[in-house]
Amino acid sequence: MTALRSVTIIVNPTAGRGRRRTDHATRLAGALRRAGVAVQVVHTRDRGHATALARAAVRHGGCSHIVATGGDGTVAEVARGLAGSDVVLAVLPVGTANVLARELDLPFDEDLLARSIIAGATTTVWPGVLHTAQGMSLFVQMAGVGFDAHVVHTVSPRLKQAVGRGAYVVSVLRALWRYRYPVLRVEVDGAVHEASSAIISKGALYAGRHVLAPASVQGEKAFSVVLFGKAGPWATLRYGLALLRVPCRARRM
């Protein structure tokens, strides 16, 4: 159990849809301060800034918890910033899909999250390490290569704020006949496979509560590799419809 010293709340003011993220952070900060906890609230300006803010909080010292207030992208950025430290990552999920929060059944309520932080409740997750031309970084839920990665990269931030998950549907429809579907050579446990897309998943869930890799568990030092063999718009549509037919994981209330 990590001794509670102080909490830094990192807020992505553009995360989610139609909600005032600063209000969520303010309520969480208020609940913690009423319990006598020192709290600092900082806001991100652009992509990658959450990592820099988390690193600064770690370097400053005295911080026991950093709360990522945003979606899965914000969580991943904060995780990269505190990697290698003893600071605990907490999540206030106010993003579009909030996959990691659903995966770990984390509280979506500010008061419940505050009580969890004060009580010292933690769970251990083992992130993946991604190596790209831009360098090395962590991923805490999944990493995609191919069509999935293209959709996430090209989705409109403004549309995400306006229509939430529907923005990804729009991005998929735009990409179906524009994406070139290159053949990927993927090596898994020494065996080479050809695929049109690949998703490397630390958890079971994808795009909210949809179960993609049921054998994956965040608390284990392993991950699942999901390969999509066939290429083209019609095959991609069939994969998407198959995912929608899989029962969603119910959230424990």
Image (cartoon, rainbow, N blue to C red):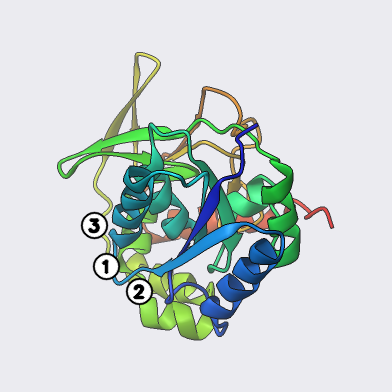
Q: Earlier in the sequence, mark 3 or mark 2?
A: 2
- Which structural element holds mark 3? loop
- The numbered disc on residue 180 is 3
Residue occupying image coordinates x 48% and y 40%? 87
Closest to the observer, 173 or 96: 96
Where is residue 212? Give x, y as percent: 59, 44
Closest to the observer, 3 or 14: 3
**C-alpha distance separating marks 3 and 2:** 12 Å
**C-alpha distance separating marks 2 and 1:** 7 Å
Cβ–Cβ below 8 Å for labels 2 and 1? yes
- The numbered disc on residue 178 is 1
- Amino acid type, callout 2: Arg
List the single residue furthest toward the left: 133
Residue occupying image coordinates x 33% and y 57%? 53
| 240 vs 19: above or below | above
| 156 vs 246: above or below | below
List the single residue furthest toward the top: 190
Tell me: 156 left or right of 23.
Answer: left
| Residue hosting label 2 | 174
- Amino acid type, callout 1: Arg
- Amino acid type, callout 3: Arg
Which quadrant of the figure contains the C terminus?
bottom right
Closest to the observer, 173 or 1: 1
Tell me: 112 left or right of 82.
Answer: right
Packing grade of label 3 (10 A; few <14, some 14-19, many >=20) is: some
Cβ–Cβ below 8 Å for labels 3 and 1? no
Where is residue 237? Give x, y as percent: 49, 60
Residue occupying image coordinates x 29% and y 54%? 52
- Which structural element holds mark 2? helix
Tell me: 51 left or right of 65.
Answer: left
**Residue 230 at least partly seen:** no
